[in-house]
Amino acid sequence: MIISLIKKIIPKPVIQFYHFLLAFLGALIFGFPSFSGKIKIIGVTGTNGKTSVIEMINQIFEEAKFKTSLSSSLHFKIDKKEQFNTLRMTTPGRFFLQKFLKKSISSGCQYAILEITSEGIKQYRHKFIKFDIAVFTNLFPEHIESHGSFENYKKAKGQLFAATKDIHIINFDDENSNYFLQFPAKEKWLYTFGDIKENDIKNNNWKLVKAKIISDGYPLIFSIDNIVFRLNLIGVFNIYNALCAISTALSQGISLETCQKALEKFNGVPGRMEKVIDQPFKVFVDYAFTPQALEKVYQTLSSNFKVQGSRLICVLGAAGGGRDKWKRPILGEIAAKYCQEIIITNEDPYDEDPAEIINQVANGAQNADINHQKPIIHKILDRREAIYQALKIAKEGDIVVITGKGCEPSIVIKGKKIPWDDRKVAREEFEKLMTK
């Protein structure tokens, strides 16, 4: 509350200068490591899929015998040393990042792969880092209260591309691709499942990576230039993530064959569409907290695992701290569209009234305009109890999906971090249920 009050009192230019100064000091103290010429920096931005793309890029580059480091919402890795990200920040602070890059160079890493968020860009955490490759996954409304509008949110993402002069990797199938194409770069790699006019490619000197989907079930199968890729994952969005990573690899001279070999070994990202229980019903944990990501999760599970008579039982919530209040009823509405039973619970209420957040999500579910039977809606404040009840009502063949946190290591209530892991809690409550 005090920090929020201070932010309101201090003029915006002063806050911006403060963040800029921290970025400069961080780079100065650690010797501007990204400008040393000893490492290439890949910045990955977008609304959804960033962490998965980073993990896929890393898998491919390691297969190609490059030493890599990475920084994501999931973990930090320098060569073979890994550390779980417990900071509750996807893009860490300026001093952390510059120190991370210096350590990466000392460890002989040739590439650093960084997850770059709009919030991080807004606070200049990307400043004084020389990005060699900027990667765009997709763009949907998010962090609107923080940025003031979707346009401002998009412009924040664009700053990464404005700062990167060498190579841009762009999802051409995203409706915002033209915005990111306007930024100058030596090379522009576009990935797509659609059609691009040949003249556009030639006139703009674009490099095109076009894929064809062969199967959108399990495994996912697609091809590029007659080379067939098989992913041990579900969801078409994961084909897009793979195509993004492949395009990044191709820009560095890595062959399609190496990409193929690496991705066939890729078994997903913890907390992203992760199956934690298989029998007598299936339980999945996913990080999805945006409307688009949530809908894709529900669509994927419905099409791949639901059978006649089975139910989708959904545990969800919405973050507090003033984060995107607009989307709370929308999340509820999406859940009502796909789920037969909905359990609305705490996610990360921060300093907000958790009951009010739950009610806002529930209002969306209750007022959803759907053409099938209304789902049964439960409101349970305690997230552990909510997960237990979801498992308790599940029957053989049902699917329980727990969204919003993935494998985040804590839940934040009234400013206090409480150790947490949806996957661990689901397994613990399942064991309790089975021993009763």
Image: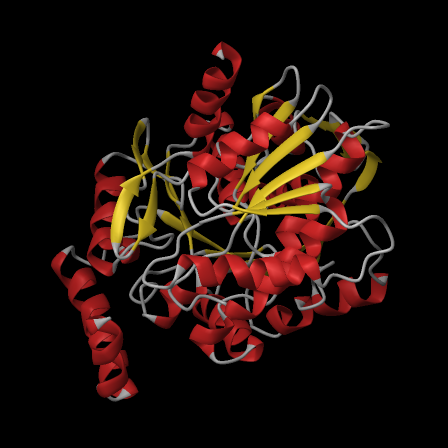
Q: Quadrant of residue 284?
A: top right
Q: Looking at the image, which is closer to me, 303 or 208?
A: 303
Q: What is the x, y in percent for residue 390?
A: 58, 33
Residue 203 drawn above or below residue 191: below
Q: Residue furthest front?
A: 436
Q: What is the x, y in percent for residue 184?
A: 56, 72
- The residue sitting at 31% across, 64% down in the picture is 125
- The residue sitting at 46% across, 44% down in the picture is 405
- The residue sitting at 30% across, 46% down in the picture is 38
Residue 431 drawn above or below residue 205: above
Residue 269 seen in the current view:
no
Q: Residue furthest top?
A: 435
Give the left or right position of residue 286, taking residue 220 as reference: left
Q: What is the x, y in percent for residue 266?
A: 57, 26
The colour scheme applied to this rendered structure is secondary structure
Give the left or right position of residue 285, taking residue 413 as reference: right
Q: What is the x, y in percent for residue 79?
A: 33, 31
Residue 256 seen in the current view:
yes
Give the left or right position of residue 188, taking residue 7 as reference: right
- The residue sitting at 24% across, 70% down in the picture is 1
Residue 242 drawn above or below residue 227: below
Q: Residue furthest left?
A: 29
